[in-house]
Image (cartoon, helix red, strand yellow):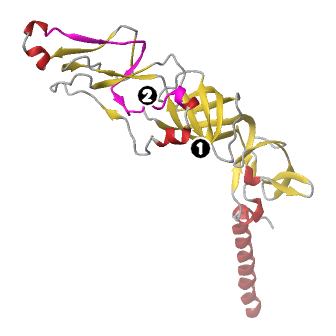
């Protein structure tokens, strides 16, 4: 009797340990099965084809200069629009031309020669980087005049300091004329003359026409359909070129696509198993793919090459 009673605790202990191990395995079964994989939830989305392109902007701009020496008052709002003939600046004349006759010290006004946006900043490239020069001049030499370190010169006038006669006060940009640009391209990005291109600058999308394709430097001259907001802030900039329209639908990581036999598909992470599902690829940009054959909310393995 004593030997039998000693065996029972040992048997019950083994059964208890067994059930404890089973419980642990059951609770961690998902990690055990899928632990080596990255899992992504399938969602609706867009597969975009976009490329960031460095550009040089060219607008129809004119430097405005002081008609006389004296104290000048400029508009406080940068980029304000003025109509043709509207007063942009007011100057109280001073200097040798006016010292001998105090009666002539009446206020002199600077009027807009044409309608446009007035900026008190300029980069000395206003009459060099123009739409006409982009089309007609040798671009290597023309664009080389723009230093990478060039930034707009802030000419906000000190109200206590007089300006000299003919000194620059700022520039007037004709925003009724379209913005032109030279777009730097490479072997992976091609444009064709007369093509319509779409670009994103800041928060806005614009369309443009390819006017000329050049080889040195490699790129294209594009005329936008309108003035591009922000194109006067910096002569050089970056735009997003929409290479082709996006595709909307069920989106998965491109890395989740796999081949099984002669079928292309994805591996789905289901309750306790991994199953292959054939899909039709509608679009793929190398990062994301738009597919048919699976539904939003399903889970795909994004690194199926780990699968043995």
Q: Please, what secondary structure does the residue beneath circle 2 have?
A: loop
> Residue 128 magenta-drawn?
yes
Circle 2 Cα neighbour tier, 10 Å, few/some/many (<14 / 14–19 / ≥20): some
Cα gap from disc 1 to disc 2, whole angstroms? 21 Å
Give the quadrant of the N terminus: bottom right
Q: Which of marks 2 and 1 precedes in the sequence?
A: 2
- Residue 115: horizontal and vertical position, in percent? 43, 12
Disc number placed over residue 217 in the picture, else none: 1
Q: Is residue 229 left or right of residue 272?
A: left
Residue in view at x 27 percent, y 22 percent = 166
In the rendering, at what x and y percent does residue 133 appear?
52, 30
Q: Is residue 18 among what the camera can see?
A: yes
Element at badge 1?
A: loop
Q: Residue furthest bottom?
A: 3
Label total for image? 2
Residue 112 belongs to the span the image colors magenta: yes
Quadrant location of residue 207?
top right
How packed mark 1 is, by other alpha carbons closer than 10 Å (few <14, some 14-19, many 20 or more), is some
| Residue 290 visible | no
Does 290 appear above or below 8?
A: above
Identify the residue position indicated by label 2 in the image. Answer: 127
Judge by depth and name the residue closer to the eye, 245 or 155.
Answer: 155
Query: Residue 259 sits in which quadrant?
Result: bottom right
CB under 8 Å between callouts 1 and 2? no
Decide if residue 222 is on the left or right side of residue 156: right
Residue 154 lies left or right of residue 95; in this view the side is right
In magenta, the rendered stretch is 105-133
Residue 72, numbered label: none
264 to 114, vertically: above or below = below
């Amino acid at each position: 009797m004593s030997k039998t009673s000693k065996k029972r605790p040992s048997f019950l202990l083994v059964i208890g340990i067994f059930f404890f191990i089973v419980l642990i395995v059951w609770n961690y079964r998902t990690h055990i099965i899928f632990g080596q994989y990255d899992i992504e939830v399938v969602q609706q989305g867009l597969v975009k084809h976009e490329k960031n392109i460095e550009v040089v902007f060219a607008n129809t701009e004119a430097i405005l200069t002081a008609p006389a020496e004296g104290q000048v008052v400029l508009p406080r709002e940068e980029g304000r629009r003025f109509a043709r003939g509207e007063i942009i600046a007011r100057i109280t004349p001073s200097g040798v031309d006016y010292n001998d006759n105090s009666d002539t010290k009446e206020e002199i006004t600077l009027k807009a020669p044409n309608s446009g946006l007035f900026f008190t900043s300029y980069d000395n490239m206003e009459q060099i980087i123009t739409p006409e020069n982009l089309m007609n001049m040798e671009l290597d030499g023309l664009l080389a005049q723009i230093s990478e370190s060039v930034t707009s010169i802030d000419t906000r006038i000190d109200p206590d300091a007089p300006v000299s006669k003919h000194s620059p006060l700022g520039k007037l940009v004709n925003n009724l004329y379209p913005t032109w640009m030279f777009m730097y391209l490479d072997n992976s990005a091609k444009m064709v003359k007369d093509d319509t291109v779409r670009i994103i600058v800041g928060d806005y999308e614009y369309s443009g026409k390819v006017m000329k394709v050049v080889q040195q430097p490699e790129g294209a001259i594009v005329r936008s359909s309108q003035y591009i907001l922000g194109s006067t802030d910096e002569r050089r900039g970056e735009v997003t070129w929409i290479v082709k329209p996006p595709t909307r639908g069920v989106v998965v990581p491109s890395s989740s696509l796999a081949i099984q036999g002669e079928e292309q598909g994805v591996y789905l992470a289901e309750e306790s198993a991994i199953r292959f599902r054939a899909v039709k690829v509608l679009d793929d940009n190398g990062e994301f793919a738009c597919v048919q054959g699976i539904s939003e909310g399903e889970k795909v393995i994004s690194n199926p090459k780990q699968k043995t």
